[in-house]
Image (spheres, rainbow, N blue to C red):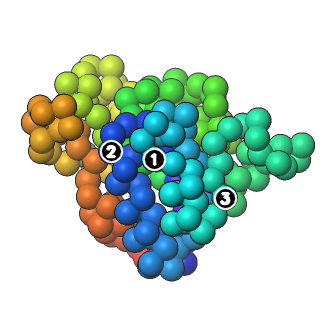
Amino acid sequence: MARVLLIVGGGIAAYKSLELVRLLKKAGHEVTPVLTKGGEHFVTAMSLGTLAESQVHSSLWELKDEVEIGHIQLSRAADFVLVCPATADLLAKMAAGIADDLATTLLLATDKPVVVAPAMNVRMWLHAATRRNVQQLVADGVKVIEPAEGEMACGEHGPGRLPEPQDIVGWLEQNGFFGGK
């Protein structure tokens, strides 16, 4: 059983995080969700919390144990951190070391492996700044689940789609995040 700290970014692909949580729980893993402000526009804390059977964290200032530096504890209680979907904004903040909300603060505070599953418009994914940010993250040790190619919510076609939840779980299994390799 793995303990997954799941950071849900603010993109239309966030709806797939609900199925991802369901699959992770069904496989016996523990999921602690962190919902970004952007993510709250696409999925609700109630849905995430119900599926995860866990409290959903969304604000650095709402953690009840913040007196005991709760964000540090939260970042260290997991076996790994999964950012899904990882928006262009989240990737840029991660690459620059920005910590201006709970999610980005957790990412700086963790000493555990970090995996990102990017999802964004094809032009955003192929933009030089995003490519640079992903290169920086890889150099920093972050693992990247490459986006799928296909039709986007905006109607465009190309790389940038979030892989299907079962494909994300399969990638995590193949890469030893559930105690395998």
What residue is at 26 percent from the left and 25 percent from the top? 124
Secondary element at tag 1 = loop
Q: What amino acid is found at the position of numbered circle 3 in the picture?
A: Gln
User: Could you tell me which quadrant the N terminus lies in?
Assistant: bottom right
Q: Mark 3 sits on what residue? A: 55
Toward which corner of the image does residue 107 lie, by quadrant? top right
Q: What secondary structure is found at the residue carrying circle 3? A: loop
Q: Which residue is mark 2?
A: 13
Q: Position of residue 131 (x, y in %)?
A: 29, 28
Residue identified by numbered label 1:
43
Q: Is residue 9 left or right of residue 16?
A: right
In the rendered image, residue 108, in percent from the top left (x then y), is placed at 63, 37
Q: Nearer the viewer, residue 103 or 116?
A: 103
Q: Reply above or below: 51 against 179.
A: above
Find the distance from the CA under tag 1 to the CA under tag 3: 15 Å
Residue in the picture at 33% in, 45% down: 13
Front residue of 170/38: it is 38
Judged left or right of residue 12, residue 153 is: left
Q: Amino acid at mark 1?
A: Val
Amino acid under disc 2: Ala
